[in-house]
Image (tube, rainbow, N blue to C red):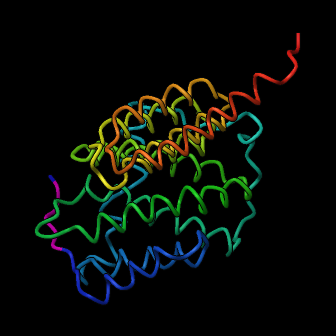
């Protein structure tokens, strides 16, 4: 049974969140987001919620149901012998555990009342993990912690079932890190197609999918996709989409002019 919990939200915490939104992905940002999430908890839960949530036990229970693989490549899977009593690594491990607990928060707690700031802060943590913490774990060859975090990210994305476009966007970010380009493109395209043409980020989502196709050298697919976007976008967005489409046609022409290799 989930533990009921009421979260704190006030102008100071909102300003703290807005400030973190403008920061680069770094250790300071990660620490700031974790502090922001902690400050939203009731005082009695701040020190013991990791133990209550039991993040790694939950990961073991759910790991066989995860919808994606946690390995990135064979070259990244070798485990480096861990130095004992390494303070810097222990700090990283502690942050991984605390991060997993926040990502899996809804599996252990039933949030009562307003929680918009908290869930927005969770998404900010998600992005900080993918862009900073996972690369840090890769550089330190901390494979167990890295795989636990990937699993926690995958599970966290499923908690956004009431907002499928955002769920798919979060999954696309993780797929990009995992070098699963086909899954990344599929998630971005599906997120775009679930977005209303009059939505303010309709073209932004289309451009994200288009860029992923170009990065995967799928220029013809990118052209067909942007033609679909052009046909369905609002009149106000036509000029912006046309610019992207013209750029795509230019890339098609360049590709056609390249000599064929046998």
Residues 77 and 214: in front is 214
227 vs 72, left or right, is left
Q: How many marks?
A: 0
Q: Which residues are magenta?
A: 2-6
Verify whether residue 82 appears in magenta: no
Verify whether residue 5 appears in magenta: yes
Q: Quarter holding the C terminus?
A: top right
Q: Position of residue 195 (x, y in %)?
A: 30, 43
Q: Tell me what residue is drawn at x 33 percent, y 73 percent.
A: 48
Q: Position of residue 225 (x, y in %)?
A: 48, 29
Q: Tell me what residue is drawn at x 25 percent, y 43 percent.
A: 161
Q: Tell me what residue is drawn at x 88 percent, y 15 percent.
A: 261
Q: Position of residue 222 (x, y in %)?
A: 56, 30
Residues 142 and 245: in front is 245
101 vs 163, left or right, is right
The quarter holding residue 73 reads top right
249 vs 60, left or right, is right
262 vs 61, left or right, is right
The quarter holding residue 130 reads bottom right
Considering the whole magenta stretch, tell me its main secondary structure.
strand
Q: Position of residue 6 (x, y in %)?
A: 15, 73
The quarter holding residue 70 reads top right
Q: Is residue 10 above or below residue 131?
A: below
Residues 166 and 68: in front is 166
Q: Tell me what residue is drawn at x 64 percent, y 36 percent.
A: 214
Residue that protrudes farthest toward the top in the picture:
262
């Amino acid at each position: 049974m989930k533990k009921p919990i009421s979260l704190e939200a006030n102008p100071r915490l909102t300003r703290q969140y807005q400030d973190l939104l403008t920061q680069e992905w770094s250790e300071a940002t990660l620490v700031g987001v974790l502090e922001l999430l902690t400050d939203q908890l009731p005082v009695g839960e701040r020190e013991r919620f990791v133990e209550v949530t039991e993040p790694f036990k939950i990961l073991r229970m759910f790991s066989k149901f995860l919808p994606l693989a946690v390995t990135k490549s064979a070259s990244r899977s070798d485990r480096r012998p861990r130095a004992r009593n390494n303070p810097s690594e222990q700090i990283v491990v502690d942050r991984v555990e605390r991060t997993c607990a926040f990502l899996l928060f809804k599996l252990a707690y039933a949030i009562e009342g307003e929680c918009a700031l908290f869930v927005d802060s969770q998404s900010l943590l998600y992005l900080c993990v993918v862009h900073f913490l996972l690369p840090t774990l890769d550089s330190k060859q901390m494979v167990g912690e890295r795989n636990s975090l990937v699993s926690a990210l995958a599970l966290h994305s499923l908690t956004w079932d009431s907002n499928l476009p955002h769920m798919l966007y979060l999954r696309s970010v993780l797929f990009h890190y995992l070098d699963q380009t086909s899954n990344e493109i599929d998630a971005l395209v599906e997120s775009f197609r679930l977005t209303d043409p009059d939505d303010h980020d309709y073209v932004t989502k289309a451009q994200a999918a288009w860029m992923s196709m170009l990065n995967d050298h799928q220029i013809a697919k990118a052209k067909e996709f942007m033609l679909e976007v052009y046909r369905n976008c609002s009149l106000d967005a036509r000029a912006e989409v046309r610019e992207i489409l013209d750029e795509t046609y230019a890339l098609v022409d360049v590709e056609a002019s390249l000599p064929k290799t046998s």
